[in-house]
Image: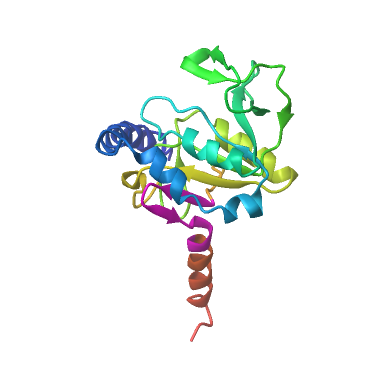
Amino acid sequence: MSQAPDKTQLRHRMRTLRAEAAARDPDAADKLADLFPMKLLERYGPVVAGYVAINEEIDPAPLMQRLSRAGAELCLPRIEDDGRMTWRLWSIGEPLERRPFGLSEPGMDAPEVNPTLILTPLLAFDAMGNRLGYGKGHYDRAISSLRSAGRAFACALAYPAQQIDSVPSESHDQPLDWALTPIGSVPLFMMRNMKALNSNDAGPGAA
């Protein structure tokens, strides 16, 4: 049975919750930038994919500025005419094109790169790293392609209220490795590994 209706209803609810969280915490972006663990850049950089916030997404701009000062090479997503999402090199202050759906993206002449640390927007996530996006699948396909070619560490930027008990997941969904909120980090890959270990311990033959 398809889980699409569940995700559709959840998206409506999470848009409202995210808007409320944004209104309650206007300094969230600065707090998030201050709390970012720089060890992630050391381990998974130097090419970092950010994004330009729309609606009530938490704004990554202060964090991207901090990472750039620390030596990161920044890039931004671009939705190509064939529907693929690519990442294009971008530096703070460079102009962006106004694209469909109100998105601001690098021009097609910007070099295409493969980021190793991806900052992602979202509507919701859970402790296992399941991510609720907007239903287009752009991030899932792009991150899947990166992971098939090498390493790619996906770090969600979110308000605490965006962490929920369970996000419906499907086989093509790409799990998050980390989440950063204005009150701290959620090491999702560690939590996922711990659950897997506990499941193995409780399997047949366990004492």
Residue 159 image position (x, y, % from top left): 36, 43
| Scheme by which the image is coloured | rainbow
Residue 1 image position (x, y, % from top left): 43, 40
Residue 41 falls left or right of residue 195: right
The residue sitting at 72% across, 17% down in the picture is 109
Answer whether residue 20 is visible to the viewer in this image: yes
Q: Number of numbered discs present?
A: 0
Residue 23 image position (x, y, % from top left): 26, 33
Does 97 appear in magenta?
Answer: no
Q: What stretch is highlighted in magenta?
A: 177-191
Residue 24 falls left or right of residue 32: left
Residue 206 image position (x, y, % from top left): 51, 82
Q: Which image quadrant is residue 173 in?
A: top right
Q: Is residue 182 above or below residue 90?
A: below
Q: Which image quadrant is residue 143 in?
A: top right
Does 185 appear in magenta?
Answer: yes
Residue 40 falls left or right of residue 21: right
Answer whether residue 169 is visible to the viewer in this image: no
**Residue 155 versus residue 123: which sits nearer the camera?**
155
**Residue 204 versus residue 25: which sits nearer the camera?**
25
The residue sitting at 58% across, 28% down in the picture is 92
Q: Which residue lies furthest to the bottom in this view?
A: 207
The residue sitting at 63% across, 31% down in the picture is 75
